[in-house]
Image (spheres, helix red, strand yellow):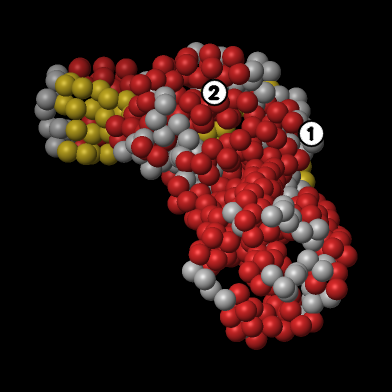
C-alpha cells in the first residue's frame, strides 16, 4: 500500500465535498439541530418557560413506559426528586442517544456514495483507474475519505454536546453529569463499527448501481438500524446499557468485517469498468 | 525500431458479448498509429486491456516489454491516456487536477509544479490555472485532459477519440497539439478515432478495426496497395475527348479502365503511374491541349469504407 496515494485520493475527495455546498450545508444542519438546538431547548428554553417536567415525562405514553421499565443500571442516574434534572437526563442522556448515530450515517452515506458511485456517474473514474495507483490504494483512499470525517465530526459533535449538557444546566445539576457511561461505547465502539459497515455496503453497492442517488439511497438503509435502536429503547424492549452496547457493537463489527472482506475482494478495476457496460 | 506493443489474438468479453476477438496489433517505438473503427469496434476496450485495466481471457500481449495482465501498474506509470470524455474533476481547479494526477503518477510535488507550469503554458491554459474546471469550455477541458495525460512524460500516449464532441475550432486546436506532440517523435502515440481525416493527417500507420479485431494494418500506401490496388488519373483537355482515343488508351498496358467524365475530361484507372507519360505523348502527338493531369490516389476514407464493406460481406 502506498500511503501517499491513499492520502492524495482522500484529500481530493475532501476538497470536492468542500467545494460542493449542496453536499456540506445539509451535513451541517442536522448535526447543529441534534448537537446544539435540541440540548438548548431542554436545558435553557424549557427551564426558562417554567414547564412542568412531569408534563413532558408523563404526557407521552412511550416515555412513561420507558421510565417504568428502565433497568436499575440506568435508573440510578435519575433522581426523581429533581424533576427538571430527570427530564434532561431522560431526554438528552437516554432517549436521544441512538439518534446521535445518525450523524456518522449522514456523513458516510453522502461522502462514500459521492466518492464511489458519483465518480462513475460523472465518468471521472476512468482517468483515476488509468493511474498507477493500485486497487488497494484506490479503495483505502476512498474509504478514508468517507470514514475519517464521519468519525471525527461525530466525535467533535459529542464534545460540543457534552459541553452544552454540562455547562448550560450547571445551575441545576451543580456537577458535570455528562457523558453517562452508556455514551462511551456508543461513541467509540458502535460509531466506528457503523461507519465501517456503511462504507463496506456502499463499496459493494457502488459497483452495481450506475449513479450517486442509487448508492446513497441503498447505503442510507443503514438508518433502519438506528430506527430499530430508537424504537427498541422507546418501547422498552431494548435499553442501551453498557453491556447491550458492547454486544451490539461486536455484532455490527462482525457484519462490517464480513462485508468489508467481500468489498475488498470484489473491488477491482475490471469490475468497475465492466459494470459500466 | 523496437516493438513497443505486440498483441497476438487477444480476446475480451463483457458478459456474453466479445468486445475483442482475435485482436492482433503491433506498434513500433516512436510511431504514431491510428486505431480506426466504428463505435463499438473495440477501440476503447483495447486501450483498457493494453493498460491492464481489463484482463484478456486469451492471447498474448506485451506493452513496453511488460505483460498488462500482471504489470498493469508499471505500464500505467509509463503510459498516458486521454480518455474519451475529459474525465476531469470539475469542482477542482486546473492546477489541482494536475497536482492530483501527478501525485498518483509518482511525481514529487516539485516535479508536479514544474510540469504543470510547463504544460499549462504549452496548452495556453496558464491564465485559467486557478479556475475551477466547470467554468472551462469543452476545448479547454480536452486540452487540460491532454496535459494530464502528458504530465508524467509517458513513453506511450493513448488518445481515445480526442476530438469527438468538440466544435471544429476546438477540434483543430487539439489536432494541432497532437501534431506538435507527434512531430517531436519523443513518444509513441496510439490514436483511436473514427475521424478518417484526422488519422490521415496525424498518423504514420493505420490499423482498421471491426467487431473487435484488426481487419487491416499498415501505412496508407500499404493499405492502398492491399485494398484498392489502382490509382485514378484525371486528364482535363482543351478539346473535346474523342471516343477513339479512349479505345486506344484502354488497350495500353497497365490501364485497367477508361471513363469519360465530361466532354473535355476523362479518367484512367491504372495499376500504377507508369502509363501516364505514354498517354500524354499520344495526346500531344494528336495536337490536343492538356490543361491538367491529376493523379488521385484512394483516400483513407475510400480504403476504410471498402474494408468495412468487405468485412460486412464476409460476415453476411
For disc 2, the marked residue is B150
Residue A73 position in % (x across, y down): 85, 69
User: What is the secondary structure assignment of the residue under circle 1?
Assistant: loop
**Which subunit holds the residue at mark 2?**
B
Quarter of the rendering occupied by the C terminus of chain B: bottom right
Q: Position of residue A221 (x, y in %)?
A: 65, 68
Residue visible at 21% across and 22% down in the picture: B292
Front residue of this view, candidates B91 and B33: B91
Residue A248 visible in the picture:
no
Position above or below: B235 against A86: above
Inter-mark Cα distance, 2 to 1: 25 Å
Q: Which numbered dot is residue A26?
A: none
- Using the image, name the chain to which the residue with label 1 belongs: A
What's the mark number on residue A1? 1
Q: Residue at x 76, y 40 (%)?
A: A136
Looking at the image, can residue A46 be seen?
yes
Q: Position of residue A64 (x, y in %)?
A: 69, 83
Identify the residue at horizontal 19%, vertical 33% (top origin).
Answer: B265
Front position among marks 2 and 1? 1
Q: Is residue B92 above or below residue B119?
A: below
Q: How far from the left and from the top, in percent, is residue B6?
A: 70, 30
Amino acid at each position: 500500500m502506498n500511503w501517499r496515494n491513499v492520502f492524495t485520493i482522500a484529500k481530493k475527495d475532501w476538497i470536492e465535498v468542500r467545494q460542493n455546498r449542496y453536499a456540506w450545508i445539509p451535513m451541517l444542519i442536522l448535526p447543529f439541530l441534534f448537537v446544539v438546538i435540541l440540548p438548548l431547548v431542554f436545558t435553557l428554553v424549557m427551564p426558562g418557560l417554567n414547564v412542568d417536567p412531569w408534563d413532558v415525562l408523563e404526557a407521552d405514553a412511550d416515555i412513561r413506559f420507558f421510565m417504568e421499565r428502565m433497568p436499575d443500571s440506568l435508573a440510578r442516574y435519575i433522581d426523581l426528586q429533581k424533576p427538571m434534572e430527570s427530564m434532561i437526563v431522560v431526554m438528552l442522556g437516554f432517549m436521544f442517544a441512538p439518534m446521535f448515530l445518525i450523524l456518522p450515517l449522514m456523513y458516510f452515506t453522502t461522502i462514500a456514495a459521492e466518492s464511489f458511485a458519483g465518480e462513475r456517474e460523472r465518468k471521472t473514474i476512468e482517468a483515476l483507474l488509468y493511474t498507477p495507483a493500485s486497487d488497494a490504494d484506490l479503495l483505502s483512499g476512498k474509504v478514508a475519505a468517507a470514514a475519517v470525517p464521519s468519525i471525527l465530526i461525530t466525535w467533535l459533535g459529542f464534545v460540543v454536546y457534552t459541553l452544552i449538557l454540562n455547562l448550560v444546566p450547571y445551575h441545576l445539576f451543580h456537577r458535570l453529569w455528562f457523558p453517562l457511561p452508556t455514551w462511551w461505547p456508543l461513541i467509540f465502539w458502535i460509531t466506528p463499527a457503523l461507519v465501517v459497515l456503511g462504507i463496506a455496503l456502499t463499496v459493494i453497492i457502488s459497483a452495481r448501481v450506475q449513479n450517486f442517488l442509487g448508492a446513497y439511497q441503498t447505503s442510507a438503509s443503514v438508518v433502519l438500524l438506528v430506527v430499530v435502536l430508537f424504537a427498541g429503547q422507546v418501547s422498552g424492549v431494548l435499553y442501551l446499557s453498557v453491556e447491550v452496547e458492547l454486544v451490539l457493537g461486536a455484532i455490527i463489527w462482525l457484519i462490517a468485517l464480513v462485508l468489508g472482506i467481500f468489498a475488498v475482494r470484489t473491488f477491482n478495476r475490471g469490475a468497475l469498468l465492466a459494470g459500466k457496460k | 525500431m523496437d516493438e513497443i506493443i505486440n498483441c497476438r489474438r487477444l480476446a475480451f468479453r463483457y458478459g456474453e458479448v466479445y468486445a475483442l476477438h482475435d485482436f492482433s496489433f503491433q506498434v513500433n517505438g516512436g510511431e504514431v498509429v491510428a486505431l480506426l473503427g466504428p463505435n463499438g469496434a473495440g477501440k476503447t476496450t483495447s486501450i483498457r486491456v493494453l493498460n491492464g485495466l481489463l484482463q484478456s481471457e486469451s492471447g498474448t500481449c506485451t506493452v513496453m516489454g511488460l505483460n498488462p495482465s500482471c504489470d498493469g501498474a508499471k505500464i500505467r506509470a509509463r503510459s498516458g491516456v486521454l480518455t474519451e470524455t475529459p474525465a476531469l474533476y470539475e469542482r477542482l481547479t486546473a492546477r489541482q487536477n494536475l497536482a492530483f494526477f501527478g501525485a498518483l503518477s509518482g511525481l514529487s510535488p516539485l516535479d508536479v509544479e514544474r510540469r504543470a507550469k510547463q504544460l499549462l503554458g504549452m496548452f495556453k491554459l496558464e491564465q485559467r490555472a486557478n479556475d475551477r474546471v466547470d467554468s472551462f469550455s469543452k476545448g479547454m477541458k480536452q486540452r487540460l485532459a491532454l496535459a494530464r495525460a502528458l504530465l508524467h512524460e509517458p513513453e506511450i500516449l493513448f488518445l481515445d477519440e480526442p476530438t469527438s464532441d468538440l466544435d471544429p475550432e476546438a477540434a483543430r486546436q487539439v489536432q494541432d497539439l497532437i501534431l506538435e506532440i507527434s512531430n517531436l517523435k519523443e513518444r509513441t502515440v496510439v490514436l483511436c478515432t473514427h475521424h478518417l481525416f484526422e488519422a490521415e493527417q496525424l498518423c504514420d500507420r493505420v490499423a482498421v478495426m471491426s467487431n473487435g479485431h484488426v481487419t487491416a494494418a499498415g501505412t496508407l500506401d500499404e493499405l492502398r496497395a492491399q485494398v484498392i490496388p489502382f490509382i485514378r488519373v484525371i486528364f482535363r483537355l482543351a478539346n473535346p475527348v474523342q471516343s477513339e482515343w479512349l479505345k486506344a488508351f484502354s488497350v495500353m498496358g497497365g490501364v485497367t479502365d477508361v471513363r469519360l467524365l465530361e466532354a473535355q475530361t476523362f479518367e484512367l484507372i491504372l495499376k500504377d503511374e507508369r502509363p501516364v507519360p505514354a498517354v500524354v505523348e499520344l495526346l500531344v502527338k494528336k495536337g490536343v491541349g492538356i490543361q491538367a493531369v491529376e493523379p488521385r490516389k484512394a483516400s483513407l476514407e475510400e480504403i476504410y469504407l471498402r474494408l468495412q464493406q468487405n468485412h460486412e460481406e464476409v460476415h453476411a
